[in-house]
Amino acid sequence: MNEDARGELQPVIRAGESLLWAGRPDPAWRWRRGDLAATATGVVFGAFITFWLSLAIGNGAPFFFPLFGSVFALFALWMLIGRWFYRAARARRTAYGLTPTRAYIVVKGSVTTHPLRESLTVRRSGEHVDVVFADETRPGRGWTAVGNTGAEFIMRSRYDAAFYDVADADGLLGALDRAQRSVTKD
């Protein structure tokens, strides 16, 4: 159990609950589910805006056109590069906790809880595991995307619905088994 995360979670867990497991996401850069779509979006926007800006600047368009295009260039850069830095920084500010009845996600002091239920989504990739407690997507017009891409605010997804990139997979899954056994007893 990660003692640093435990110290951050202890003040926010409900009275009568005890932590079975506490940890943090791994901040290392890893290719994840959802990264292909985010990267492809960045490439398409980057290619288009490079073409558009070269035409606007090369043909002497009014200053508004390059200014307008720079907003899209920033978006493309975010989707290609910025979201990786953001995701790593956010992981360093996130703590996860599991009690016999609920999951706690603390991001920079903001607490989200999810009651444990019998059916959870567990995704294991190598030494890391994701445990999804709620729907990762937010309803929108058309498409939605998975969480933990670093672009949730753009792609209509959530970060507070799961434990992502947990390197202590065996510890978390063991605690989750104990918690689910206690939930099914009740």
Image (cartoon, rainbow, N blue to C red):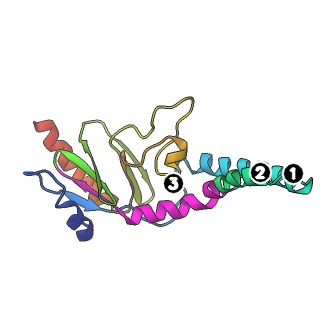
Tell me what residue is drawn at x 39 percent, y 37 percent. Answer: 135
Q: Is residue 150 left or right of residue 113?
A: right
> Residue 175 magenta-drawn?
no
Q: Amino acid at mark 1?
A: Ala
Compute the Cα span from label 2 to label 1.
8 Å
- Which quadrant is the C terminus positioned in? top left
| Residue that badge 1 annotates | 61
Q: Is residue 16 left or right of residue 132?
A: left
CB contact under 8 Å: marks 2 and 1: yes
Q: Nearer the viewer, mark 1 or mark 3?
A: 1
Decide whether the magenta segment is chiefly helix, strand or loop: helix
Q: Amino acid at mark 3?
A: Gly
Compute the Cα span from label 1 to label 3.
34 Å
Residue 150 circle label: 3
Q: Amino acid at mark 2?
A: Phe
- Which quadrant is the N terminus positioned in? bottom left
Tell me what residue is drawn at x 18 percent, y 49 percent. Answer: 178
Q: Nearer the viewer, mark 3 or mark 2?
A: 2
Q: Could you classify mark 3 by the number of other residues whose Cα lies within 10 Å: few (under 14), some (14-19), or many (20 or more)?
A: many
Region in magenta: 77-99
